[in-house]
């Protein structure tokens, strides 16, 4: 099939996947660059792993989500599956490379989940993760605090100043709370998962789930409420440190001591004001062993209004399994409305190689959601001028009178001169293009300059540089004549001058747009 | 499994795949950046397609190589396969997006082939392709010539000046030659594939294959020899244009006229001297319809010596199927020793959508082979100094006497200051690291500067900047004292000064190394 005329099948990408092109691809690429620049600033080194792993590497790592793993067909040889996240391949790589006992690694790549897609909400089966993880045995909370500094730098440089909150909690504090409140050991994970829903359900509903669905004693639930409804900063920590019941629990005490160190370090890193100690944050994945965190845009109306998925999530009190599923982030490891999440996982590498336990702490940025929110803001604030699908500086064109030959080779030679000087240039591929066609192409590509060749000017060793889009009456509206020898330098000067006033980062673009 | 202690399986990546980390990942990334900068200079826009396609999209596109396609398991829903190249997904995308009738697109991504891997030779089952293609109906040979200009710019900027040749031929010339020599219609493709082996077999062996294996008349073979053994430039073209037998064949004549235009345009683009019109170039894939080309490193001893696969290929006269296979490029679409290849394919989009035929011409760079050759050259010429696995500018460290507290928060605050200024900085994650440990970490990371905090200096609002690796006796060997207020600017000045003398591109690095 397929080779015959007329395809007998749907011309489409597989369910839950899409093509990225044009200005969307460019904007996403700028987000990647922004994030990876921050990663490099903190000494991150790149790791790239295969898109598929031996199936047994992934087995037993994702609990009931394992059913969402894509398997490769058995075509003889090894049995493989597409990677489900970037964390397990990182742990597998650490276990394989025994000479590496500590590293800061980053990895920006696609992962695969056979989940029910919701394309309009940005939940896809193929999507990007941007991960930064610090592996190694160090003094408590030092790398953990640097991860949150990285989170803050990323969102500042994306232009989200004042629009995000880093929710922070500690698995040991949470476990200690459940323990002193009287939650039976076997109910700790189910009750933890109920608490995690407090970002989209009122307490009354969560309590109902605990008592009616999960069989918890109502008084225990009420004791839990006193703790998990708290959020704050140092003052909350101070209160908890004075709580004798809680401090009598060794696990809780260890967690609180970690949290005190963490706050000191966050202050030294200048990010304490971006962090909310939120006792209701529980996070889904089982493998976290210490601090956990999640970045949300809630409380910043501007961004929320942009993100349809976040908006929907605000209509809280969802109960049906379906609507709850629909409101989940693309990435099941992210909570509702969250754009990045992570935590400390000290035991994962040991699942591959028990003798070589390597503690790790990391963060994963949900780029597809960050993309949707950023794009919506740029569109709303009509600040999309920086979003061209190509970056061409100059369109080389020609015109002439009757019998005009199109000057194709002359246009080629001028382009060659510009390319050799590192300038980005295009020309029309027709032998004899009409001048309006050439201008139209330059306009459609939002190309800032035209280099115009005329027969008489060229014979005199000259051509014309015209800045596109100048207003009527501007002194250079018709362009300026320059010698061919000075073309490159004249054009470079004008390009540099024009880019002086223009935005160079997403942060500038968004902040400029907000003014 | 997996979750229990002691993994019961091999800790490895799947056959034919590998992890990329450290300086290898960084060098490969620099090659990607070099190539994509050239693509953008020519107005290329990025396209990203899913890693898997509906299986029927790939069906009937790759002939007998289809057996090398990786299939996803049928887990319910659509039947999919991993992409085999980037060309068919591009054609599928063009067929799906009817508003786009012309585009320059580039795509840098992994493709998948269940071939017998030869890891030591760089032939992998998962490998990168870097593709640039121009789609659209234009005047003959104009975009075709720009593709070869792009090829030349890429290798110049990779530092391969004088070490590569672009072999160029035209399917119509070749078909015309076979026709006038008397090759029967049904033998044209097999005879073409025999001719394609002239880069690794002497004529006598190729003739033997034609006559003994493929049943061609010996006299016909001798007539073919008179044509296909020729390589040259304009003078060869001029000879052929005077060849009355050949010009009597309409196909050959059309091909020769294309080639005459092509040479004119290549001259205007300043790349004619890098191109060899090579009548033995045939290329394997069936879908080419016009110009075909392949970039080789042969004739440049320096590069050949670096590439083990190219070296082996030089021991010509291979006959056994196995050794021939072993010497093939990673990418079956590339010939022996070739590092990039492509051509014009006017009918591929029409396989998806007959009513919307869109002619295309493109090039695919074999990055894995380019990586191996570049790395070997850098190592041989000991020019690996630019290849650090991270890009950190400064290591912030502290020392003190008896009772020294480690100054962790002070080191954090200084790092915060540097990060906020966009500088790349690291510090030791221990509370009280020893000074030699800290220097060792900076040395291992080849970090150019140390920022050293001492208790007395800090109390006086000062610290010390020390450039690493200065020779004994240098005035700043022990570092220079600066105020904390001026730290950022003093450090920036020194970083800028140090990078002035250093290489900024692969071309500079390799050219510097060659001196």
Image (cartoon, coloured by chain):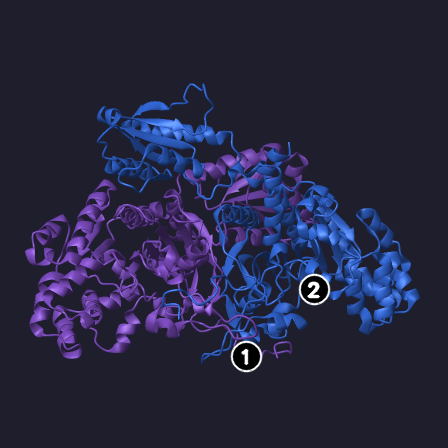
Chain colours: A blue, B purple
> Which quadrant of the figure contains the C terminus of chain A?
top right
Q: Which residue is farthest right?
A: A219
> Which quadrant of the figure contains the N terminus of chain A?
bottom left
Q: Can you tell which quarter of the image residue A289 is in? A: bottom right
Circles 2 and 1 on the same chain: no
Q: Which residue is mark 2?
A: A288
Q: Can you tell which quarter of the image residue A383 is in? A: top right
**Residue A199 horizontal side relative to residue B20, left or right:** right
| Chain identifier of the residue bearing label 1 in the image | B
Q: Please say if A472 is above or below A196.
A: above
Q: Residue at x 83, y 70 (%)?
A: A213
Q: Which residue is mark 1?
A: B9
Residue B93 is at least partly visible in this image: yes
Q: Can you tell which quarter of the image residue B281 is in? A: bottom left
**Residue B250 horizontal side relative to residue A116, left or right:** left
Instruction: Find residue A459 and report its horizontal and vertical position in percent.
Output: 22, 26
Compute the Cα span from label 2 to label 1.
25 Å
């Amino acid at each position: 099939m397929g080779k015959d005329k007329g395809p007998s099948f749907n011309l489409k990408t597989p369910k839950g996947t899409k093509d990225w092109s044009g200005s969307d691809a460019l904007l996403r690429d700028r987000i990647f660059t922004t994030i990876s620049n921050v990663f490099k600033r903190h000494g991150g080194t790149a790791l790239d792993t295969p898109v598929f792993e031996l199936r047994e590497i992934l087995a037993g790592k994702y609990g009931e989500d394992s059913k969402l793993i894509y398997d490769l067909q058995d075509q003889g040889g090894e049995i493989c599956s597409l990677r489900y996240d970037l964390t397990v391949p990182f742990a597998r790589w650490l276990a394989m490379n025994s000479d590496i006992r500590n590293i800061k690694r980053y990895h920006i790549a696609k992962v695969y989940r056979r989940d029910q897609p919701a394309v309009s909400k940005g939940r896809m089966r193929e999507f990007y993760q941007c991960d930064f993880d610090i592996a190694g045995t160090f003094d408590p909370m030092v790398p953990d605090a640097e991860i949150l500094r990285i989170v803050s730098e990323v969102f500042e440089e994306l232009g989200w100043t004042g629009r995000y909150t880093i929710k922070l909690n500690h698995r040991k504090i949470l476990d200690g709370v459940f323990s002193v409140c009287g939650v039976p050991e076997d109910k700790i994970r189910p009750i933890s998962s109920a608490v995690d829903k407090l970002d989209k359900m009122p307490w009354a509903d969560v309590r109902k789930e605990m008592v009616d669905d999960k069989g918890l004693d109502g008084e225990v639930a009420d004791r839990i409420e006193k703790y998990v409804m708290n959020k704050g900063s140092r003052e909350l920590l101070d209160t908890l440190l004075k709580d004798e019941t809680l401090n009598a629990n060794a696990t809780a005490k260890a967690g609180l001591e970690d949290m005190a160190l963490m706050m000191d370090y966050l202050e030294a890193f200048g990010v304490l004001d971006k962090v909310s100690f939120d006792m209701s944050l529980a996070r889904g994945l089982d493998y976290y062993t210490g601090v956990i965190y999640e970045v949300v845009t809630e409380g910043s109306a501007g961004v929320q209004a942009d993100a349809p998925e976040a908006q929907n999530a605000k209509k809280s009190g969802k109960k049906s399994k379906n609507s709850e599923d629909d409101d989940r982030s693309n990435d099941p490891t992210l909570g509702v409305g969250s754009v990045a999440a992570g935590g400390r996982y000290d035991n994962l590498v040991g699942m591959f190689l028990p003798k070589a336990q390597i503690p790790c702490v990391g963060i994963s940025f949900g780029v597809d959601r960050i993309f949707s929110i950023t794009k919506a803001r740029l569109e709303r604030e009509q600040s999309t001028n920086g979003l061209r699908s190509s970056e061409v500086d100059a369109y080389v064109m020609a015109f002439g009178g009757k019998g005009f030959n199109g000057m194709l080779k002359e246009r080629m030679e001028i382009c060659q001169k510009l390319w050799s000087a590192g300038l980005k240039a295009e020309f029309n591929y027709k032998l004899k293009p009409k001048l309006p066609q050439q201008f139209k192409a330059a306009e459609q590509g939002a190309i800032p300059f035209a280099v115009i060749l005329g027969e008489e000017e060229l014979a005199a060793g000259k051509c014309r540089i015209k800045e596109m889009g100048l207003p009527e009456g501007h002194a250079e509206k018709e362009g300026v004549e320059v010698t061919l020898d000075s073309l490159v330098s004249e054009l470079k000067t004008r390009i540099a001058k024009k880019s002086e006033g223009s935005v160079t980062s997403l942060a500038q673009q968004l902040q400029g747009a907000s003014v």
